[in-house]
Image (spheres, rainbow, N blue to C red):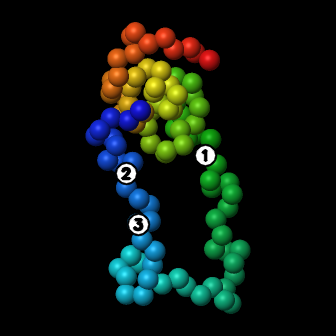
């Protein structure tokens, strides 16, 4: 669950359009012939971050990269997953903790 204010943050696209000749989205792809490919690679350990942000309730990792609650805990509590604002009244809901 996400509130209307935080929904705008999620609606942006990472890559809105492909690069075409004459497009303003970025430079053309570079030719990497003759270069040392091992120097330009990112290491796999850079992707793993043990201190990454986790859910406040169950401590599971949050996949969106922003927020306080995972989707399951946000729905159970009736709060926004990103900012934590109360979105839904869950007082009369019968929800299991499984």
Residue 47 visible in the shown view: yes
Question: Is residue 88 positioned above or below 21 on the image?
Answer: above
The residue where tag 3 is placed is 16
The residue where tag 2 is placed is 11
Closer to the camera, 90 or 38? 90
Question: Is residue 78 positioned above or below 29 on the image?
Answer: above
Kindly check if marks 2 and 1 are in contact, taking CB atoms under 8 A apart as contact.
no
Q: Position of residue 27 (x, y in %)?
A: 44, 82
Q: Position of residue 23 (x, y in %)?
A: 37, 82
Marks 2/3: CA–CA distance:
11 Å
Closer to the camera, 12 or 95? 95
Decide which of tag 2 and tag 1 comes sooner along the chain: 2
Give the crowd class for mark 1: few <14, some 14-19, many >=20 residues within 10 Å: few
Image quarter hosting the N terminus: top left
Secondary structure type for disc 3? loop
Decide which of tag 1 and tag 3 comes sooner along the chain: 3
Image quarter hosting the C terminus: top right
Residue at image position (66%, 70%) is 41
Closer to the camera, 20 or 34? 20
- Kindly indicate the quadrant of the structure image that contains residue 88: top left
From this viewpoint, which residue is outermost toward the left? Answer: 5
Decide which of tag 2 and tag 3 comes sooner along the chain: 2
Residue at image position (69%, 81%) is 36
Secondary structure type for disc 1? loop
Closer to the camera, 18 or 83? 18
Q: Position of residue 76 (x, y in %)?
A: 47, 21
The residue where tag 1 is placed is 49
Marks 1/3: CA–CA distance:
28 Å
Kindly check if marks 2 and 3 are in contact, taking CB atoms under 8 A apart as contact.
no
Which of labels 1 and 3 is toward the front? Answer: 3
Identify the mark at residue 10; answer none if there is no mark.
none
Residue 56 visible in the shown view: no
């Amino acid at each position: 669950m996400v509130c209307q204010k935080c929904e705008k943050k999620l609606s942006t696209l990472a890559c809105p359009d492909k690069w075409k000749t004459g497009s303003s989205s970025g430079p053309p792809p570079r030719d990497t012939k003759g270069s040392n490919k091992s120097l330009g690679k990112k290491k796999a350990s850079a992707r793993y971050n043990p201190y990454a942000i986790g859910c406040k309730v169950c401590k599971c990792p949050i996949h969106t990269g922003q927020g306080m609650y995972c989707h399951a805990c946000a729905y159970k509590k009736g709060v926004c997953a990103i900012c934590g604002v109360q979105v839904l009244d869950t007082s009369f809901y019968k929800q299991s903790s499984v």
